[in-house]
Amino acid sequence: MKANRFFELVELPTKVASVFPFIIGTLYALYRYGRINGINLLVMAIAMLSLDMSATALNNYMDYKRAIKTHGFNYEQQNAIVKYKLKENTVRWVIGGMASISMILGVYLFLRTDIVVLFLGMVSFFFAAIYSWGPFPISRTPLGEIVSGVVMGGIIPFISAYIHIFDQDLIRIGWTDGTLLFHLDVVELVGFFVVSLPLIAGISNIMLANNTCDMEDDFENRRFTLPLVIGKENALRLFAGIYGLGYVAIIIGSVIGWLPKTSLAVIVTVIPVRKNVLKFFDNQSKKETFLLSVQNFVIMSAAYAVSLAVGLLLK
């Protein structure tokens, strides 16, 4: 398979949805705990990207297999399998190959850390598979936004930080005299959740914008996504409100001390983000305005990462 076709099959530009959570999780480990492990960092990066590409290729493959409406921009131009007439067997090999690389590296990362990484890795694999595969794929339900947001915006940054601080007793699992023991540092885990909320919000909104643009096609293809369930007007209100939740989380994290005070500067990005939201309100088009949600995610996440890096330097 030619490189350009592979990149379209795995939708390479959308990998920002996993790269930024990875970067921010790593910076948070450095800022909050002053810890970094170069080997774990590299293994995690390759495993994460491999799984993300596998999941995207699987999603495109299942959309191709299940499509009822087989014409129009979303089908003929957006799906690389149709666009380049890719062989199904070749696509399956790509999916399996990327998943295998991620699985092998994930096991290696577990051996270098602890069982928490294994468990969260298994959870990530599970949702990556059932998101678009199986009798009831998540992408065809109203749960797509929350699942993609939590897995990519919540689990990825947590693992990206945890692989450097696994020996700091955030989570400890033990077995004593026939009793299974759990130790959780609740305050730190709540901090992780708050720090991840802007990422969860941005990624959820990419999916929400995608499904809002595809309402007509999704109805024909029997994909009962969130916008179809709650209606377009409510979906647009939710789209704006989710961004607000992300900004509130940054303010709370900065005030409490989980984030550096420099992170408050991310609030400035509300200006271009709001401008893009209003444009999306005027026209919900996969071809013309969907990318505004991706732009918003990049704007917020890039500013967020820079604010953590500056806070780390000042610290």
Image (cartoon, grey):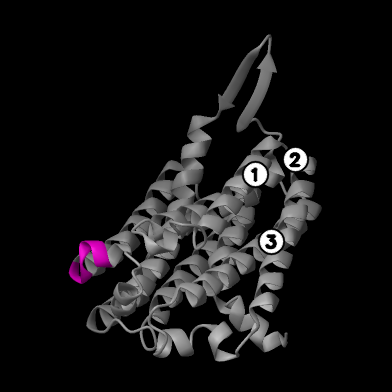
* Badge 3 or badge 2: first in the primary sequence: 3
Task: Quadrant for the N terminus, please.
Answer: bottom right
| SS class, disc 2 | loop
Q: CB of mark 1 within 8 Å of CB of mark 2?
A: yes
Q: Magenta span: helix, strand or loop, mainly?
A: helix
Q: Nearer the viewer, residue 84 or 157?
A: 84
Q: Is residue 156 above or below residue 218?
A: above
Q: Which mark is residue 47?
A: none
Q: Nearer the viewer, residue 271 or 21?
A: 21
* Residue type indicated by callout 1: Tyr
Q: Does the magenta-highlighted stretch encompass residue 34?
A: no
* Residue type indicated by callout 3: Ala
- Gap between marks 1 and 3 measured at Cα: 22 Å
Regarding residue 111, the answer to whether it shows in the image is: yes
Image coordinates of residue 182 in percent, x first then y, are 58, 23
Q: Give the residue drawn at x 47%, y 89%.
A: 76
Image coordinates of residue 51 in percent, x first then y, are 64, 61
In the displayed structure image, the side of residue 46 where residue 233 appears, left or right: left
Q: Which residue is mark 3?
A: 99
Q: Nearer the viewer, residue 221 or 154?
A: 221
Query: Which residues fall within the magenta stretch?
Result: 228-233
Q: CB of mark 3 within 8 Å of CB of mark 2?
A: no
